[in-house]
Amino acid sequence: MMKLPDWISKRETAHGATIVLDNRQSGSEEVYSDTSLADVHDAEVSDKIRQMIRLYEYGDGSFKQKCLNFYRQGKFMEDYEDDQPWDGDFKHYFPTYHDLSIPKLRGYFTWRTNVRKGIYRPIASSLAYIYLYELLNGIGTTSAEESLWKMQEFETEFLDSGVGDWLMTYNLHRWMLEFAVIHQLPKKVVLTLASPKMLERDRKIAVLRDPENHSNEEVFNALCHFTTGKFESSPAVTKNPDDGRRLFAEVWRHTLTNYDDNGEDFITACFGPWKAFPWYPLANSVYHETRELTDFDYALDECRIYQYRDGRWLVQTYEELLFNKKRISTLLHETDRLLRIYLKTGHPLRPKPENAWATPFVEAVIAEDRQAKIEAARPKVNINLDNLSQIRQDAAVTRESLLTEEDRAEANIEPAPVEIVIAEPVANEIESIPLDPIHRQILLTLLDGGSTDELIREHRLIPSVVTDALNEAFYEVIGDSILDCDGDSICLVEDYVEEVRNMLTGEAEVLSS
């Protein structure tokens, strides 16, 4: 039996949990539409079930009416127990008591009786869903905390034992989070129910939204989270860890401050607007709201606020479907290109016309950093201003005594201005990429439009590992991933086909000459 969490108010607990994995003997049946209850004039059917059946009202036949009927019947049968098992199969979308025949109905209540004693026997998934719907509606529990705890117990004792399926697990996780939010349970509880991936995404956006209050390392890591390139492997970072990360972060800060595209800020350009979107908690369950709710906000984290406004649920967040990760990758690719030149790391990247919008932001940061380094390198001289006049006089006398007649004549001629041009390093026409024969053969096969499946099987390789290895090998030269992998097959990124072809062909010519 699961231990009752500290955040739940003291409740009466069950007396242990037992998993009974018995084999099902009955045949199975599948039902996908509403079926009426069987004749209820069976002498063995209790008056309680007869009365529950009569509580059903067809009304307008809407899903809302279905949820209302379920809640009304469920509360009526809240404490009912039975001892007539049924172990057949049953499939139904959004199942309720009304969809069950008498044997199934009694079988469900018998199973529920055992569950409340901590005995979780196998049962058809559609019937187990009815139990979860009961918990969502507070049927058989005295508080939202207790309902949530029983859902967690159900996951541990039923789903984790291998009885349920992945879809039920997915739905349960979604419902627990939504249920906890709409009941405004403690934030520390809700955070344990939310998707770790979602929370991590929100944390990274929060860092990028306010980079001034986060370290260079935090900003750089957040940027890498939203890109497909391996910028942490760039020579600008690996050869200059502190300077590289700092300058990447400074480029982001500078762009955030100075970017303006017809009034659109850079965070919005990358992640879309931070606004309230419609939210539909428990929409894919049988749930009837009985509380009189007033408007409230529930801030889960810095980037996610759940809201209730005038009978509508909203969530203020950055919608992932609106993310423009290519915008971030473009900025980082141009930053990588110019930093390799500025920091003299070698392996220069070719400029891309589509990245030109980012160039001024990167150049501004580099210019500021260069000037700061010049200022820091200048010797510090302390001058006593009180003696400045005497120093000037002494210097003038000394200079006059040292000048020859020729020097005096030349002193009246102003020197011609000198233009200083700093040349950028030029990329080698051919970069040497260390590849073993099989990885080279894989690349050549892809360049010829062939399939690498046989090569990979023959050499007992894993496609995703081959992809990562080749992307890593070419990253310093290309500055991006040259291959994509869907898990089973590998393909070249179209933008780099010719570049890779020229590198392999050119290298082969050099080796043969």
Image (cartoon, rainbow, N blue to C red):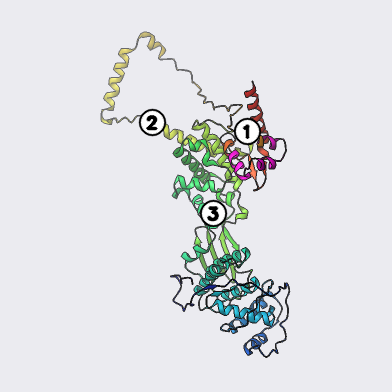
The residue depicted at 56 percent of the width and 61 percent of the height is 316
Between 432 and 218, which is closer to the camera in this rendering?
432
Q: Main secondary structure of the magenta part?
A: helix
The residue mark sitting in front, 3 or 2, is 3
Where residue 377 is drawn, which disc sits there?
2
Q: Earlier in the sequence, mark 2 or mark 1?
A: 2
Between 285 and 471, which is closer to the camera in this rendering?
471
Q: Is residue 129 above or below residue 325?
A: below
Q: Position of residue 60 (x, y in %)?
A: 71, 79
Is residue 139 visible to the viewer in this orientation of the structure? no
Q: Is residue 442 above or below residue 262?
A: above
Task: Say whether residue 149 is left or right of residue 457.
Answer: left
Magenta region: 443-471
Mark 3 secondary-structure assignment: helix
Where residue 201 is drawn, which disc sits there?
3
Snapshot quadrant of residue 94: bottom right
Q: Earlier in the sequence, mark 3 or mark 1?
A: 3
- Amino acid type, label 2: Ala
Snapshot quadrant of residue 104: bottom right
- Amino acid type, label 3: Arg
- Give the Cα separation between the discs numbered 2 and 1: 49 Å
Other residues around mark 2 within 10 Å, as few (<14) / some (14–19) / many (≥20): few
